[in-house]
Amino acid sequence: MRILGIDPGLRRTGFGVIDVDGPRLIYVASGTIVVPGNLSLAARLKTILDHIREVAEQTKPDIAAVEKVFLNTNPTSTLLLGQARGAALCGLADSGLEVHEYTALQIKKAVVGSGRAAKEQVQHMVQRLLSLNGVPAADSADALACAICHAHMQPVAVALGRGGLSASSGRMRNGRLLG
Amino acid sequence: MRILGIDPGLRRTGFGVIDVDGPRLIYVASGTIVVPGNLSLAARLKTILDHIREVAEQTKPDIAAVEKVFLNTNPTSTLLLGQARGAALCGLADSGLEVHEYTALQIKKAVVGSGRAAKEQVQHMVQRLLSLNGVPAADSADALACAICHAHMQPVAVALGRGGLSASSGRMRNGRLLG
């Protein structure tokens, strides 16, 4: 099973793709969709929509997991975040993906074991769980953590012994897959 | 110029299409996208996205106008509204439309002449301005009012006179050309 995790935001939307092979988690791709602030709101949302569809098309996930938005005390910020999240969910649904939603608490518990974990701990554990060479950037780490959370929520599936097949891996930045 | 007006909401999204021909406003189409509440959030947003694209494809507007969301005191409601609005804006931008945004105050002022107008007054004035046989439903009326507001904000470009082309400039108020 391939999972696409998303951490939505109007300025920066993180994405991370992992494969689940029995008990193993395999890193596939991750990156951040950086949205230029000088565009109109509709154009910014379209940027998110387009890049999410592009990531889905390039990585072909089976399912998507999205972090629930933190309810900001500032209603204007909440509205902007909501619109960005709407665009991200539209991109996923438009790519035919079923979307699961997890709170930051669920994600931190799944990845670090505690809901009170700091951002750095999440980045550190994502690096460890996916055997990455370096610490992933914050947005990518949150998106990968969301995908890991979804993997952990699944009943342990049948481990597919693929006899030597190894998943291709790479990183994506700004919607482009880097070897 | 053909204008598509949208009044976004998660349960009901109103749409209304009008043509602007010099000082005349001509009704083209209107309706409400009713989203089933039993669907997942992503599926509900996808319903809005799909129907907005369908309306745009069928009516071929030149430009879109969207009502700005009222900031609810309840942050959960604001977030849900934001997501619905994000889906509507994505549908418009995905159809290649430039999107203009107007507050409820601007829309009411443009249609009724007062920002404190009741819903029924908006419906009544939309019926009058577009010479409709019946009172439009509330969601359709709000969407049509948004399109009318955009028409009123435009400088009147070129009026076609019988003796040839004559240019005039000014603004429209309640369907009448001023200046």
Image (tube, coloured by chain):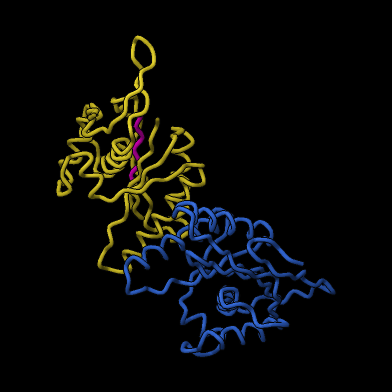
Chain colours: A blue, B yellow
Q: Give residue B122's position: percent from left, percent from top.
A: 19, 41
The residue positioned 66% from the left and 56% from the top of the image is A57
Q: Tell which of B45 and A121 is nearer to you.
A: A121
User: Residue B11 location, x and y as percent?
Assistant: 34, 53
Dominant SS in magenta:
strand
Check the image and report above or below for A19 versus B105: below
The residue that appears at 32% across and 64% down in the rendered structure is B78
Q: In which quadrant will I find the C terminus of chain A? A: bottom right
Quarter of the image where one finds residue A68: bottom left
- Magenta extent: B14-19
Q: Does the segment drawn in magenta span residue A110? A: no
Which residue, as the protein is rendered here, is positioned at the far top? Answer: B163
Residue B60 x %, y %: 46, 33
Quarter of the image where the N terminus of chain A is located: bottom right
Image-quadrant location for residue B15: top left
Question: Measured from the top left, where is residue A110 in percent x and y?
Answer: 54, 84
Is B120 positioned to the left or the right of B23 in the image?
A: left
Query: Quick check: B43 above or below B22?
Result: below
* In this picture, residue A150 sits left or right of residue B80: right
Q: Nearer the viewer, residue A162 or B131?
A: B131
Q: Farthest residue to the right: give it.
A: A164
Residue that appears at 51% across and 88% down: A118
From this view, report whether residue A30 is shown above or below residue B112. Answer: below
What residue is at 17 percent from the left and 40 percent from the top? B113
Q: Is residue B69 left or right of residue B46?
A: left
